[in-house]
Amino acid sequence: MPQPVIGCDLSRAFLDLCDLPSGRMQRIPNTRDAIAEWAETLTPDVLVVFEATSGCDDILIATLTERAHPFSRVNPRQAREFARATGVLAKTDRVDARVLAQMGAALDLPVTRPVSPAPATLADFLRRRRQLVDMRKAEKLRRHSAGHDDIAEQIDAMIALLSTQISVLDQRIKAIIAADRALAEQAALMSTVPGIGPTVMAVLLGELPELDTLCRRKIASLAGLAPHARESGSWKGARRI
């Protein structure tokens, strides 16, 4: 008997669900109460498949993790290529949910290991740090064409403020790593590698939770550092990451 699979298409407002092999479709609100009520109906053998959708899947992941329920969080590009390979060209919430369910039924998708709270919190602070760094970079570019001393002073003040906030975030990020045993152990190991400073180390810890579970080749590919071959017969195209 095939493993039951539920494909889940996510948006900020709703979850569209497709249950295989029954093919039943349903839509529920993307809220903690609604997802918790739906999760109570799941049997342990059901695999929930959804795309990695930043900002939309937090409640779903937290709910499934609390119940130790298996799920597979797949690359959106992989899901779209599977849809095209099966002849599905339309793209709606219901269609996407069905495609994800079919993908889970057809492929041996790996069960996603839930991220512990510390790396998830670290990733949040890293995201905010990156936003502030981008804002500071934009202000520095504007400084060159300020045109008036008063405007230049305002820009300088904003740059100083952003630099201060970035420094505060750096200290908070350092404290998050030190407070978690697993992160602290990984950080101590990474610190022995030449060229890895505090910022790179924090990014690796917060945004590559798979670091201690995959081989070096898969990690390089996941991080976008491994060029993929493009060859056919005697033709050899440029490799791309």
Image (cartoon, rainbow, N blue to C red):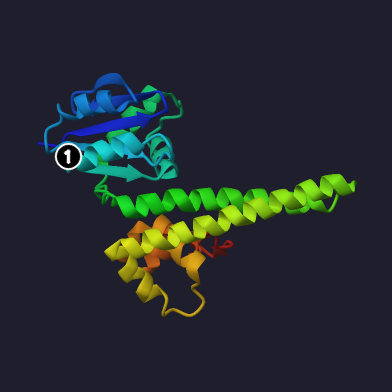
> Which residue is at the front of the view, 124 or 63?
124
Would you name the residue on which mark 1 appears? Answer: 67
Residue located 15% across and 28% down the image: 40
Q: Position of residue 197 (x, y in %)?
A: 50, 72
Up/down of 214 relative to 147, above or below? below
Quadrant where the N terminus lies?
Answer: top left
Residue farthest along the left direction in this orientation: 1
Quadrant for residue 181, please give it: bottom left
> Of helix, strand and loop, which one carries label 1?
loop
Q: Is residue 138 visible?
A: no
Q: Position of residue 66 (x, y in %)?
A: 20, 41
Quadrant for residue 150, please give it: top right
Amino acid carrying label 1: it is Arg
Q: Is residue 21 left or right of residue 137?
A: left
Residue located 54% across and 52% down the image: 129
> Which residue is at the front of the view, 165 or 212?
165
> Which residue is at the front of the view, 231 or 162?
162
> Which residue is at the front of the view, 128 or 211?
128
Q: Is residue 238 visible?
A: yes
Residue located 27% across and 47% down the image: 109
Q: Position of residue 155 (x, y in %)?
A: 76, 48
Up/down of 135 relative to 46, above or below? below
Quadrant for residue 213, please give it: bottom left
Up/down of 135 relative to 104, above or below? below
